[in-house]
Amino acid sequence: MEFMEIIKGRRSVRRFKDEKIPREHLLKILEAGIWAPSGSNIQPWEFILVTQEPTIEKIKLISPGLFGNPAALIICCINKKRAEKGGRLGENTALMDVSMAAQNMMLMAYSLGIGSCPIVSFNKTALKELLNIPEDVEPVLIISLGYPEFWPKPPKRRPLEEVVHVEEYGKPLEG
């Protein structure tokens, strides 16, 4: 697949087939995450891979944004001690770093025929307790993974001419 096809093709998938994801594919997805850009190369991310159905079911109970029956979840976390190395901007930079890692993982998943969905609506306190996440590690995003029952249609995107400003705000991009 061409890279632009991967970018344009990735969708938020919420309905999955009852099919396991091979371990080697999960490892490729996770590896894509660690190759994301990171401010000052701090790499503040921690990822928790969850594949056991009973644990996924418990997480669904505390995650109103988690739909369907995913084969796996990746809990994307910020290691606060590592983020502190970024100084005053460390927390914001860490959130951006983890977001870019998540995007890498979702794009890799799509390239392997695996659907994904980023989820931010979950009970952090309950999740930390359930997964024994230490105090200095903060879960910020859940990525659900699985083979899609279907690929959703892409939503309409605003055209470049509407969102790109050239040299200063208000100067439009011209054809």
Image: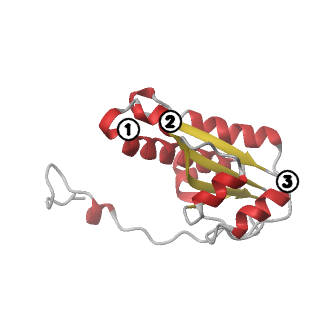
Q: In terms of secondary structure, where does tag 3 sit?
A: loop
What residue sits 15% from the left and 49% below the top? 167
Crowding near pointer 1: few (<14 within 10 Å), some, many (20+)?
many
Image location of residue 48, percent across then percent down = 68, 44
What residue sits 18% from the left and 52% below the top? 166
72 left or right of 110 in image? right
What numbered label is drawn on residue 90? 1
The type of residue carrying mark 2 is Pro
Give the label, 3 or 2, closer to the camera: 2
Above or below, comparing residue 166 to residue 161 in the picture = above
Q: CA distance from mark 1 to mark 3?
A: 37 Å
* Residues at discs 2 and 1 in contact (Cβ within 8 Å): yes
For label 2, the residue is 44
Of mark 2 and mark 1, the one earlier in the sequence is 2
Q: In terms of secondary structure, where does tag 2 sit?
A: loop
Q: CA distance from mark 3 to mark 2?
A: 29 Å
Of mark 3 and mark 2, the one earlier in the sequence is 3
What numbered label is drawn on residue 8? none
What residue sits 81% from the left and 50% below the top? 21
Q: Is residue 40 something that shows in the picture?
A: yes
Q: Quadrant of the C terminus?
A: bottom left
What numbered label is drawn on residue 20? 3
65 left or right of 68 in image? left
What residue sits 60% from the left and 58% below the top? 125
Quarter of the image for residue 26 reads: top right
